[in-house]
Image: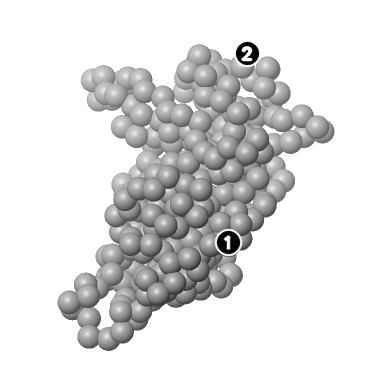
Amino acid sequence: MIAAGGVVWREHRGERQVLLVHRPRYDDWSLPKGKLVAGEHVLAAARREIEEETGQRVILGPPLGVQRYDVRKNGASVPKLVHYWSAPVDGKSREFTPNDEVDELDWLGADEARDRLSYPRDVDILDLLDCTAEVTSSLVVVRHAEAVKRKDWDGKDTDRPLTGDGQATAERLVAVLAALGVDRVLSSDAERCAATVAPYAEAIGKKVNLHPEISERGYEAHPKAMRGLGDKAWRKGKVTAICSHRPVLPALARELGLPVGKYAPGAFVVAHRLAGGGIVHERFGAP
């Protein structure tokens, strides 16, 4: 069983407060979380569950770790894995309506929250927040979704489109990029890259900023042309998505100061630059 949630927090009168939920079924105080639905990406699930349980719209930040423990299901003991992220409130905190799962919530300072939490494992997750809360900028680096194979395409390679499965991946990326609060969209000028991030850009009313230097053709012609893109991509206060190609991604990762690795179609890396200068990153498969 896989679940996802977060440490929801806000700045209130100069103090960082975290949000705990009370579940009447268990009479406990815990961090908001919930199970993934079929086909749901873990990042989208974390944001959805937080909003359903607390009424708060959040943006997911750096990961805060995972919990592993057993739960009872249908009379048997089954393992449960729960992923947590830093989850600052997006804008002002919202009103809460009690429901069957959560009948009460409370904004508390960190010390009060540690005392209130019912489970030591939740305290361990909360204790990681101080190390990662202050994020100055974030990146989501994406390999384009599945495209029509070269041998099956008669036109220009730049115009090679996504397959039906690739387009479905692009549509599923919308909820993922929304959970991360992406507000800038950059892409290779190849159709298969632009089409991967276009549904999200349309959803937020932004245009896709095309960069020929991170296309396969552009990179092959001028390998050094992407120099300086890192400074533009890591824009302070912004969450930027960048879509490129498998052969280009190693050089792009180096330019962005990220580890080089392999990307399957539609896979992506989320990276956060912290106020202290460090970078926290995590890799995901295609949604």
Please give left or right for residue 247 compared with residue 271 in the image: left
Residue at image point 69% right, 48% down: 91
Seen from the viewer's position, the closer of residues 19 and 277 is 277
Residue at image point 64% right, 56% down: 235
List the residue tagged with mark 2.
115
Hey, which quadrant is residue 11 in on the image?
Answer: top right
Q: Position of residue 148 (x, y in %)?
A: 24, 73
Residue at image point 69% right, 36% down: 10
Image quarter of the N terminus:
top left
Q: Residue furthest right?
A: 13
Q: Can residue 76 be seen in this view?
A: yes
Query: Which of the marked residues, 1 or 2, is nearer the chain's N terminus?
Result: 2
- Mark 2 is surrounded, within 10 Å at the Cα level, by few (under 14), some (14 to 19) or many (20 or more) other residues, namely few
Mark 1 lies on a secondary structure that is loop
Q: Where is residue 25 in the image (x, y as percent from the top left)?
A: 47, 23
- Mark 1 is surrounded, within 10 Å at the Cα level, by few (under 14), some (14 to 19) or many (20 or more) other residues, namely few
Please give left or right for residue 89 compared with residue 84 in the image: right
Seen from the viewer's position, the closer of residues 122 and 145 is 145
User: Which is more foreground, mark 1 or mark 2?
Assistant: 1
For marks 1 and 2, give the CA distance. Answer: 47 Å
Total marks placed: 2
Q: Is residue 150 above or below residue 255?
A: below
Hey, which quadrant is residue 247 in on the image?
Answer: bottom left
Hey, which quadrant is residue 87 in on the image?
Answer: top right
List the residue tagged with mark 1.
228
Q: Can residue 170 be seen in this view?
A: no
Q: Which amino acid does label 1 sit on?
A: Gly
Please give left or right for residue 166 compared with residue 120 in the image: left
Q: Using the image, tell me which numbered label, if any, was put on residue 169.
A: none
